[in-house]
Each structure stands twice: as C-alpha cells, then as structure tokens.
Image: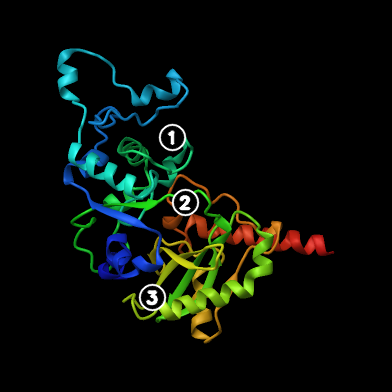
Amino acid sequence: MKVEEVNRCQIQEWYPKFKSVSIKTVIHQLPESFIQYLLDDSGPFLLPASVLNEDALPNRIHNPIEEEDFQVSEGSGDEAEDSPQPSFPELELKIKESIESLGGAVFPKLNWSAPKDSAWISTAGSLRCTSFSEIALLFRASDSLVHDLCHAYDSCQDKSSTRPHNFFLALHKWYPSLQPDMEFRCFIRDQKLIGISQREVTTFYPILLEKKNDLLSLILAFFNNYVRAKFESENYTFDVYITKDERVKIVDFNTWGAFTLSLLFAWDELERIYSEGNDVEFRIVEDRCAVRPGLKTAVPFDYLDTSEGSGWDQFLRSADEEFRQQFAEAGA
C-alpha cells in the first residue's frame, strides 16, 4: 500500500468530489495547537475553556468517582500555572457557526476516524454533538483517534512520516433517523466491485433477506454511475447508506486491507472472488446464529487489525467454525 492510497481516503480529499451523493458535511482545518492538545497526556484531563460558556457535560449526573479524572485539583498557585486551561476561541466560534448551519447537531470525525470508543462519555451516549465543548470532550477522551494522529501510514511501503501534515475536523449533519441495517461496505479490486457486506455484523436484520436483490442492484448501479470513474485508487473499500426512498449516500472510503475490516468476508476470500472473475458477492447475516459477537470494542470499528494471523483473524475464524457446528447440530 502507498501513502497516496491512504491519503485519498481522508474525508477532506474525497468529500468535495462526492458532495452531491454524500451526507451534508462541513470541514475545518485544525490548528496544530489543538492537535498537540489532543496528544498531550502529560498532565490532568483538561477541557478547553469555552468562550461561549458551553458545558460539555450539562446533564450528567454528578458522580465524584467517575468524574474525578475530569477535574483539576486546586493545588498551589504554582501548580495552577503549570496546567493552564487550554482555549481555542477562533476554532470554537467557527464550529458553532457550522453546527448551526447543519441544523444544530453534528457527528464529528478526524481525517479518517471518528471517536467511537468515547461515545459513552457524552450525555447522549452517542457521537451527537451540539457544541465545540462536546466535540473536544469526545476527541480528548478517545484512544481510537491515535490511529489518525500517530499511525495513519503504518502499513505504507513508502511512508516518510507517521502522520499527515494537516488535520481536519469533519462535521456531518446529524440524522437521528438513520438505521444501521441500511449501511453496507463495498470492496473494490482493480476498479471492479467484487463484494458487498452488511456493515453492522453484530445483528440479524430480517428485512435484509427480503430486500437483498434490490439492494444489490441499487449499490451496483451507484458504483458504476458515481464512484468507478471518480475515485482514483484501483483497490479500496467504501461505505454507503441507503435511504428510505432508495437513494444511495457515501459514508466513507477506506483502504484495501491493512486496518480496514473485511466484515463478513476474509481478505483471502475477496482475493479468490476477484481471481476467479465471479459476480459481485453480497453477504448479510442470514440468521441469529451467524451474527459476529464482540466487535464493539474500544478501538475504531474501521481500524481493527484482522489481517491473516492476527488475534482478531483467529478469533473470527474460530467463531465461524463454532457457528457452523451450531447450525449443523440445529439442522440435525
């Protein structure tokens, strides 16, 4: 894999090309001072001072044990000077304007990743944000964003740096009605769509059995009409969401292999499908015995290491075998 392939999957790179068929998004370049704030783990957990007096935890039930990590002890005057509360007033005001323009609530992410592992800390228990303070809290509490900040090019043969020159904050418009059963990952090999997988593999959705053929036709037509000629990499994956009125929206692009999850496929299976010249293979969870347990972890869903021989690869293969045995016993 090359650095240019990873860079094409940054949202600030692909979104302008696919804006008309994607979720409405506003993107801001982040100052280096904010990046250093996210990376700084030398002192206490400090949230930025808000120039708008917005509280990142407005409705949280006070629990001294849970919240002690987010409070700064008074200490001496010298200690207070050593840990000044950070502030990013210009960035905060820009983000406030963007959130208002997007309807008052957003889903934030960096160049590649979202802070999925820190959703628990928000008052809503999700990545829904209505202020800069809430975004800063999610980002500062997230370990998964370390991939973007420090390890974006770890799988690249031609890497000369561990991080991009600039970081961007993408604010997706928040849609409360989005359903996880209508999100899918598409696998492209040599600019050919060879596989499609249900995105949320921890749940069985009966409706997918009914609509599978229609969904396949929608996604294949969308790829041919909107993606094939516009995305420059030969090998990659992209995620789509299908609305109630059957419009296809691009959610994200990811690299082929490396840290990207292959979901209901194995990477060697995808290579076989490509080499044999088979038609597009569309996989869904077809019964409750075939769900994939345990994938809701404290690392980003898109960047788990499931490469051949990894711990997750062995786990998933063992889970597959167990499910086959259970299915065979149930049939008997």
Task: Please state, as top left, top right, bottom left or bottom right, where the C terminus lies in the image.
Answer: bottom right
Q: Is residue 100 above or below residue 27?
A: above
Report the residue marked by disc 2: 175
In this picture, residue 82 sits left or right of residue 95: left
Q: Is residue 207 above or below residue 229?
A: above
Estimate the x, y position of residue 138 in percent, counting from the top left.
Answer: 37, 39
- Write the residue at 58% across / 71% down: 215
Residue type at the position of mark 2: Tyr
Residue 122 location, quadrant = top left
Residue type at the position of mark 1: Ile
Could you classify mark 2 by the number of other residues whose Cα lies within 10 Å: few (under 14), some (14-19), or many (20 or more)?
A: few
Residue type at the position of mark 3: Asn
Q: Earlier in the sequence, mark 1 or mark 3?
A: 1
Front-lying residue, 215 or 138? 215
Front-lying residue, 86 or 40? 86
SS state under label 3: loop
Report the residue marked by disc 3: 235
Numbered tag placed on residue 121 in the rendering:
1
Q: Which residue is the extreme one toward the top?
A: 76
Q: Nearer the viewer, mark 1 or mark 3?
A: 1
Front-lying residue, 8 or 24? 24
- Write the residue at 47% across / 42% down: 126
Task: Please state, as top left, top right, bottom left or bottom right, where the N terminus lies in the image.
Answer: bottom left
